[in-house]
Amino acid sequence: MVSFVGLALIPLAVVASPPVEAKRTAARPALGYLRGKQINGIHILPSSFRDIRAVRALEKACFGRDAWGYGELIFVYGAFGAVRLKAVADGRLIGFVAGEPRTAEGFAWISTIGVHPEYQQRGIGSRLLSQCEAGLTESSIKLTVRASNTPAIALYRRFGYEEADRWPGYYAGGEAGILMEKKRGE
Ligand SMILES: CC(C)(COP(=O)(O)OP(=O)(O)OC[C@H]1O[C@@H](n2cnc3c(N)ncnc32)[C@H](O)[C@@H]1OP(=O)(O)O)[C@@H](O)C(=O)NCCC(=O)NCCS
């Protein structure tokens, strides 16, 4: 695992350089999502690179073998125009979502969403997803989910996402991924 101290040694050019795919994006998201909101002691706030260690810990708590490491998270924080939001409760980061505009392809992509197991089923995932969507301007939003991930699939269906494709063997262990898409403004 890369230590936090180790991360500080990564050349800034690497951290600051967005992935090639993100460089093709042009539109900036609306800024409404930047306003922090407090609902029942849960703050939904913009997330910066300074949160990377807490997000890495959250990934491990939420995703187990699918957890992203620092490499993937550096790309999340470097993605141009991406919406990155955290949920904070009791002084700790307990939720995170990232949505990336892929304007050239005509859609946005929810790259990760997670709520710490101790805080699930309290509406926090819904708040994160709702505010992330509000910061994305594309008419279509896509994501992938493990075929067996019933809670997440229920969340996405509740938000209007529908199965668009099924990718066999997409995830570690060989499980299929479901591509889900939400078409907005129709
Ligand atoms: C998916 C996840 C983000 C939902 O977060 P959450 O804060 O628990 O979600 P909410 O409390 O806002 O619930 C919203 C809806 O999601 C669905 N849902 C959430 N947890 C559920 C569960 N355990 N079983 C079935 N449906 C569930 C329900 O439709 C729920 O609506 P309802 O309360 O009206 O029934 C959370 O379960 C999580 O972090 N899971 C681990 C990481 C993960 O799988 N992320 C998605 C990767 S694609």
Image (spheres, rainbow, N blue to C red):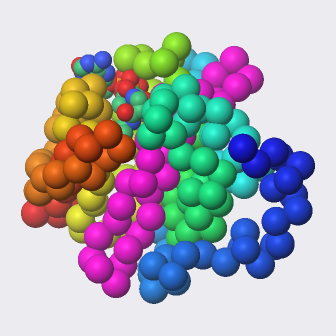
Q: Nearer the viewer, residue 28 or 157?
A: 157
Q: Is residue 1 above or below residue 14?
A: above
Residue sticking out furthest to the front: 173
For the N terminus, give its image quadrant: top right
Residue sticking out furthest to the top: 118
Q: Position of residue 119 (x, y in %)?
A: 50, 17
Residue depicted at x 60% and y 75%: 18
Highlighted magenta segment, given as a residue range: 87-115
In this picture, residue 166 sits left or right of residue 127: left
Q: Position of residue 166 (x, y in %)?
A: 13, 53
Residue depicted at x 72% and y 54%: 49
Q: Picture quarter containing residue 176?
A: top left
Residue depicted at x 83% and y 72%: 11
Q: Residue 33: tell me if it is visible.
A: no
Residue 178, magenta (yes or no): no
Q: Position of residue 132 (x, y in %)?
A: 44, 50
Q: Position of residue 41 (x, y in %)?
A: 61, 19
Q: How many marks?
A: 0
Q: Is residue 177 above or below residue 57?
A: below
Residue 94, magenta (yes or no): yes
In this picture, residue 110 sits left or right of residue 149: right
In this picture, residue 177 sits left or right of residue 19: left
Q: Residue 82: tell me if it is visible.
A: yes
Rendered-image quarter of ligand 1: top left
Q: Main secondary structure of the magenta part?
A: strand
For the C terminus, give its image quadrant: bottom left
In this picture, residue 161 sits left or right of residue 135: left
Residue depicted at x 32% and y 40%: 173
